[in-house]
Each structure stands twice: as C-alpha cells, then as structure tokens.
Image (tube, helix red, strand yellow):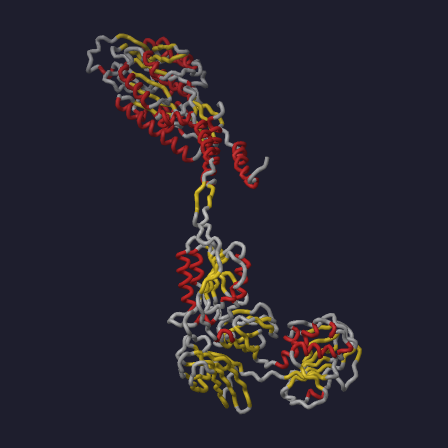
Amino acid sequence: MTSFFPSSLSARLGRLSFVQHGGRLGHHKGSHVSKKTGASLEFSDFKKYHPGDDIRHIDWNVYARTDSYFIKQFLDEQEMRVHIVLDTSKSMNFEDKWKFAQQIAIGLGQIALKNGDTVSISRIFSGKKQLFTRKGARQAGSWTTYISRFEQPSETTGLLEGIHTIPKGTTLLFVVTDALEPNEDLDKLFKQLSTRCRDVRVVAVRSKSERTPSYQGDIRFIDSESERISEVTMMNSVEIAYQLQQKKHQLRMMESAAKYGIGVLMTTPQAGPEDVFTMQMRRQGWVR
Amino acid sequence: MGFASLTNLWTLVFPVTVVIYYLFRKRFVPKTISSTLFWDEDRREENVSPFIRNLQRNALFYLQLLALLVFVWMLLAPYTKHSQTEGIPLVFIVDSSATMLATPNGSTLFEMNQEEMKKLLDSEEGRPVSVVITGKEPEFAIQNSDSPAATKVIEGLTVRYEQSHLDTSIELVKSMYGEQGAEVHIFTDALERTALAYEVTNMSWHVHTNGQKINNHSIVRFGANRREEGVTAIVKLQHDTEKAQSGKILLKESATGEVLAEESFNGEPGSEELISFKKIETEATALQAELISSDDYGADNTSYALLATERAQVVVDGKLHELLRKAAQAIEEVTIDSGEDFDEDTILRITGSESFLDKGKRPIFLVGRDTVKPIEAKGEVTVINDSLFSIAAPKDMYVEEVYPPFKDYEVLARIGKDPLIQRSPRGDIIFLADLEATDWPLQPTFPLFVWSVVKSLSDDAETLGVFTSLQRKSVVMTEAADIYELSGSYLYTTESANTLQAPAIPGIYKATDGITDKLFAVHLDSSERNVGTGDSYSTGNLAATGVKKEQSIPIIWPFLLPLLLIVLIEWEVQRRRGYPY
C-alpha cells in the first residue's frame, strides 16, 4: 500500500489546499471573519497542525491530551465538497495510465481530507455506479486503501454515463480521464459537467506511446473499446499525421472546455504524481 | 490441341510475380491500443460517403468484374487498320561519281537530284525508303527507313568522285528487292535502257538523267617528265562543246601554286588538242595543269602529274635460276639477258655477276657471287625491319652455303651469324647464296620478295604512282601510312602497310610511314571526264503499285497492362481485406 502511494508524498500533499474559483468562499474561519458574522460557526473537525497555520486555532486541550498540535476547525455553511469522477473505460487500462489515475484520485482526496473537506469518488463498475464518500483527516488511510483496490477498468461506456453519479452540492469537481473521445462527445460532456458544478477541473492522462507513438512496421491497431481496426504502415509521415491529429483534437477540446469554464490539465504518467500535484496543479492555479 | 503462339508463354512471369508478391506480402501485426482515434481520423471522412463505403466493402468483387470485362474485351481481339505503313519499298540509287558535279543550270546535277529525291519523298510518305550510293562497292546510306530520316540522309550526301559502277548497284538492289518488289529511282547523268533489261517483273525502274547538253572542256591526259634540259609536259584536251570556245592552260607547281607556263587553245567543237610545254625549269615534284574556260563541268579541268623518272626495264640474267625468272616475269615484262649491251642507266638488272655492281647509276639485284667460294651456312634466318620484308619475310628457309659478305654493306638478313641479304650504299640488293643452294624459290614468300625488290628498285623512290579516286593498290611501305594533303593537313591512316586506298578528291597527296615521305597523285577516272546526256525514262512493271495494303494491327498491350494492374490491385485488396482478422 505504501508503494502505491508513498507516505512521503502524503506528507507533501498535507501542505496543499485547493484554490476555489467559484463564487463561494473557503472554509477557513479566520479569513472570512470580517465579512461574515461568524456566529453560526459549528465545530467540524480537527486538522493536524502544519507550519503556517494560524496558531490561534490550535486546540490546546487536545494538545494537553495527545501532546500533538491540532487545529480546531468549524463547519462552515459553505463547506467544500470535493467530488472525483474516475473514467473507468477500457482505454484507461493502457500502459501505466490506470495506476496513475488512481494515484491522482488518492492525492486529490488526501488534499481535501486533510483540509477537512468532504470528498467523494464515483465510478461505473460492471454497469453500476459506485459512490464512496469520506470526510476528515483521519479518513485518509481508508480513502487510499479503497481506491487502490479498484479493479482494472473494463467499461465500454463513455464518461457521459457517469454524469448522474455526481452528488448534488458538489463545489469542486475533478474528472480523471484520458479524453480519448471524439470532440463532439467531449463537448457534450463538458456541457453536462458545467451544469452539475461551477468549478470543474479535468485531469487528462495520456500515456507515453499515446503522446508519441514509437511503433515499427505494419500494425493493425485495434481500438480497445470499440474494437475498430486501423491498419497503419509506420512511417515518419504517418507519425507526423498522428501528432497533428492529436494536436487538433487537443485544441478543440481546450476550446470547448474554455467555453464552459472548465480547466483542463494534460498530464502523463511519466511526470509522476508528485510533480503533478506540487508543480503542474500549482502552475494551473488549482492548489496552493 | 495446339497453341498458336507458344512464345507468349513468357507472360507467365506476371502471375508468378503476383504470387511471389503475395508470398512475401507484408503482414500487419495486430496490436490493441487505447484508442484509434488519432490513427483513423482521416478515414472516417471517407466513411461518410455511402458510395465509397460500398466500394470499399466490395472492392474485390468490383475488381474481379473489371478484370473479367477487360479479358472479354481482349478476347474480341481489338485491332486498328493501317493502310499507309505497308508500302512498296522506295529505293534511290544515287550516282555519286564526279560527273554529278556538272552544273548545266547553275546548280550541280547532284544538288538537283537531291531536290528531286526530297520531292519524291514528300509525296510518298509512309513508305520504307532505302538510299544506295554507287561505287565499286555500293553501300546503303539508309535502309528501309521512314521519310524524315531518309530526307536527313539525302541532305547529307556528298559526291565521292569514284566511278559510278551503276551496274553493281543495280545488281545489289535487284538481289535485295527482287522478290519483294520495289520502286527504284536511279539518279545519274545517263543510263542506257539495255542496262535494265531483265526478267524480274515486280520492280519498276525510274531513271532520272541529265537531259541537257553539257559544255565541257576536259583535260584527258597530262604527263610530265624531267629531262636534263628541264621538264617537259604534255596536256591532251578534249572539247565537248557546241561552239568554238577558246581558253588557256596553266601549268602550275602543285605545292606552291606558282604558274610556270601558260598556253592558249582554240577549242574547236568535238576536237582533241595536244598542248606541250618544254624546257620548264622547276624543282617541284608534282605539277598540275589547269584549264581556264567557260565550262559546265569543273572537276575535269585540273589534272596532276608526278615528276618521276620513267620506270626501268627489268633485265634478268639468263643464267639465273628459272624460278627467279618466272617470279620476275609474273610482275611485268622482263628481258632475258643473253649477252647484249644495255644502257645500264635505264634498266633494272637482276644478275649473278658482281661486275655490274660498278656499272651504271642504277642499283641492281645481285643473286650469289662469282668471285669467292661459298661456305657452309648454319642457323635460322633472321631479318631486320625493312620495307623489303613488309609483305613477306623469308622464314624457315634452308640454306646450304653462303658467300662471304661485302664489307661495310648494310645487312638486311642473316643466316645464323652470317649475312644473307645485304644492301649496298647505292641501293643494290645482294642475296649471298646461290638459289640452287636454298629451298627458298619453292616457298611462297620468294616471288613476293622478288616483287618487293623489283618494286623498290625500279620505282622512283619518292612516289607511289597514280591512283584513281578511292582506288586500292598494293604499295611498299614499312608500316601503315599516314595520308596528308600536300598542304600538310592530316587526312587518315591506311589500314595496313601494303595497301593504300586513295582519297576521293583528285589531287597530290603525301603518304608517310615514319621513315620516308612518298607522293602520289589521284586522278579522275577516265570515264568521269565525260558527262553523259540521256533521256529520263521508266521501265518495269510493279505488280502491286497503287494498291495500298490494309493491315490489321492487334491491340493487346494497351489492354493487357491494365488487366495485369487490376489483378495486382486485387491481390492488394485481398491481402488487406480478404482474410478474417
């Protein structure tokens, strides 16, 4: 389990928190005091102290009992509900994409849990939707275990089918997918997602040979989902045409994403999960 | 069952190629990937058209159908009709002798003939054309070719001065086209009807001749001789004119062009005239006579002569071996010496007596010695490289005994170490053995050697004599000779040392074999001094004239190739789609 998601990575993620783009505010009590009356604060959870947290929120009673610092957190009206939709179509089961997608889901969940938010994950398995919800920093372990036990993806349905699994009231929606669908389908998907949640972020995972194919000779490619066949004699010009197609697809995807205010992060297992969280997502302005 | 054209069996190559192509076809390696989204983006657009989709799915069927249709089409044996290509061969016999240079109307007969031939070609397009150039050895300038190529060749023809020998060319054409039939056009100055009288019926003859009388003065003969008091030259003229026309004769040095003397003539029609030049002082080796007058034929207005001493009479000692006499007699008239007196300066003596070595100015051929005793000979015969042996060198010759050699004389051949043939400083050739003591007279090289000796001793060493245009003659040279014009420009090199073919254009030429330079003159053949005049006529009956044959040319390749291509595409489709994945 530790090799699947190393604890050192968990430690690094603990310092991160999501940046909320939507109109709704964050949940830290201190930061919203001036705007809200704050009378309605209700205890919500304890959060382990990390350097930089407001020391005024340290619960000294807990410190006296456990000899470790905890920050008292209070349930806000605008509590952040993070939801992750995991693409379980067959195309995800290619090279190291699936493991990477799992790691991304675990990491996102840990960031949310450590910030005391509610996090849930949904996927389609054997044609049925499966939803898993956790809340609180202490749930990080079970979250990791649950996701790492996911079976290999074997669905042939697109992400559109999974739209109805998204719980109501989700404030932050992550979609982990490979986005290997026609632009028209993606556009439809983005439109649906944008009606479900105001802040949608898509993590598009592409494996190395998907980005830059390095095949040789005459190959009959078989689509893992539709089982469509495409016969290709590998040549330099063919590779260039492939790259061009991919770029075109990506551009149109970005276009339709921008249309619905959806953020898209293109990433690859080569980068490693740590780099995705600490560098790529930061650069994207998703976490801080 | 039989096969009409079994040779077409080679086309089996095509199906075999296709099968081999199939055996070595590339195979697609199946590979499952996440999505073929980017691989077949383009093809999806094709799928949009139902027509193309249909074509794709049933490609094999359509191709097979198409192949069958082409095959059926070919079984109908399509052909095109060609009526032009199968024409009666058109043959031009072109007289290229010097007389064709006559200019009755401002342009030469040859040029007029060229024009006429081109006109004929223009009107007879599509027939195979051959052009025969006359001469002792007639040759085809072009054979069974098309009109444009023949026109090109005809434009490039030139006069070759050689005597026409029209009968040879006619025989050649007869033998080549006798069975097939041909329309023959002869372009010459004059040709008797009798020349074409023979039985072959499927050839038609059209003789194009010179119909106009030619005004011609010609130098029939020109000779020059060097005497003590100077050079004497005689020019014989002939006047083939209708009116009396006076003119003059210039005597020139060939090398420098300097005019040595000048005489005028009256030029009575049909007459002959002799004009002589006497006591002309010149050191030149070659002279030329030029006729200046108004004249339609210029080629015979210049003649050349070499200033040679007259050829010596050969006198053979009656006591010598009979075979030697026979060998000498084979060359020319010889006189048998039976003791009379001769002017030693005018004869070539073949003798066995040493005493003649001192008499007269001319070198002799001495066989054996009569003042010393012979000694036994040993060893093989060896010769040096000399023009005497250039035709036939003595070889494997048995010599019983030889005479002692003359001191200081050049040794031309040895037997063992002893000299066998010597040459004196004066040029005498000495054979140091009795002919009875050798078997040489029985060998074929002996008469050739005697010929060489007589030739080299009797001829003026500086000249090779007189040739007619393109004539081939035997000469005595050590090596293949280079031929130069007198002005010094190189012309060509002869094929071998012993034969020389003269250039075509009359004049004085120089032949050199690296050791000596020898002059020779090229004259017009005497038959070329008269330009004939005759009627143009046609004879012979071409059985098939005017009947244009229609020929059906089957069209196979334009259909066979697409058929093969279709089969090839079929295999490609089969390879891609014909098998379940």
Q: Is residue B530 above or below residue A280?
A: below
Tell me the residue at 43%/25% (across/down).
B58
On screen, residue B471 versus residue B34, left or right, reads right
On screen, residue A144 versus residue A200, left or right, reads right
Seen as rendered, the residue at the extreme bottom is: B229
Q: Quadrant of residue B406?
A: bottom right
- Viewer-closest of B316 and B197: B197
On screen, residue B122 versus residue B447, left or right, reads left
Image coordinates of residue B572 in percent, x first then y, are 47, 31
On screen, residue B162 versus residue A185, left or right, reads right
- Viewer-closest of B539 and A95: B539
- Counting the numbered discs, the total is 0
Residue A48 visible? The answer is no
Quadrant holding the N terminus of chain B: top right
- Viewer-closest of A270 and B344: B344
Residue A162 visible? The answer is yes
Image coordinates of residue A88 in percent, x first then y, are 39, 16
Image coordinates of residue A255 in percent, x first then y, are 28, 26
Q: Quadrant of residue B245?
A: bottom left
- Viewer-closest of A249 and B78: B78
Image coordinates of residue B178 in percent, x first then y, are 54, 57
Q: Is residue B128 above or below residue A43?
A: below
Q: Is residue A180 above or below residue B22?
A: above
